[in-house]
Image: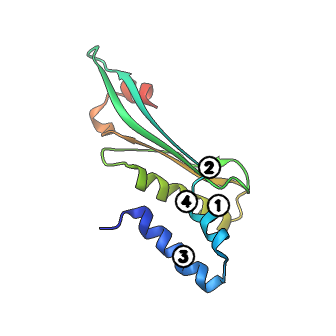
Amino acid sequence: MPNTFQNITKQVKQVAVLLKLDKATVKKLITPERVLFKEIAVKLDNGKVKKFSAYRVQFNNARGPYKGGIRFHPHADLAEVKTLALLMAVKCAVVDIPMGGGKGGVMVDPKKLSFKELENLS
């Protein structure tokens, strides 16, 4: 089953055909400039340390600095974060905000953390 990023790149390619975009432009549109992965260790209120997988994806800063927040969700994965970053880049371009697209994601259920734990993770 295709992931969310495969779905959005398929849609971009379909639109690119209608707009008669060349392959180099399409590749630039669907390829992130930077993908970061990190295991973040957080000291919990009970004194134990827990690690959380985190991603940051940055798409096309030709229009300005990267814009996008952090998604905290137990199923946040790289494909989803890449999709959201690409969509942020498109959204900024469509409404003429001079920024590129970025997004972060952390695999965590924020409802299971205290305010202090979530603040430390952030």
Numbered disc 4: secondary structure: helix
Numbered disc 1: secondary structure: helix
Which of disc 2 and disc 3 is earlier in sequence?
3
The residue at which mark 4 appears reads as: 86
Q: Are marks 1 and 2 in contact (CB under 8 Å)?
A: yes
Where residue 2 is drawn, which disc sits there?
none
Which of disc 4 and disc 1 is earlier in sequence?
4
Q: In the image, 92: left or right of 44?
A: right
User: How far, Cα to Cα, is label 1 from label 4?
Assistant: 10 Å
Q: Which amino acid does label 3 sit on?
A: Lys
1 vs 3, front mark:
3
Q: What residue type is labelled 1?
A: Cys
User: How far, Cα to Cα, is label 1 from label 2?
Assistant: 8 Å
Q: Within 10 Å of the Cα at label 3, are there few (<14), some (14-19), or many (20+) other Cα atoms?
A: some
1 vs 4, front mark:
4
The residue at which mark 3 appears reads as: 13
Where residue 67 is drawn, which disc sits there?
2
Q: In the image, 22: left or right of 8?
A: right
User: How far, Cα to Cα, is label 3 from label 2?
Assistant: 23 Å
2 vs 4, front mark:
4
Which of disc 4 and disc 2 is earlier in sequence?
2
The residue at which mark 1 appears reads as: 92
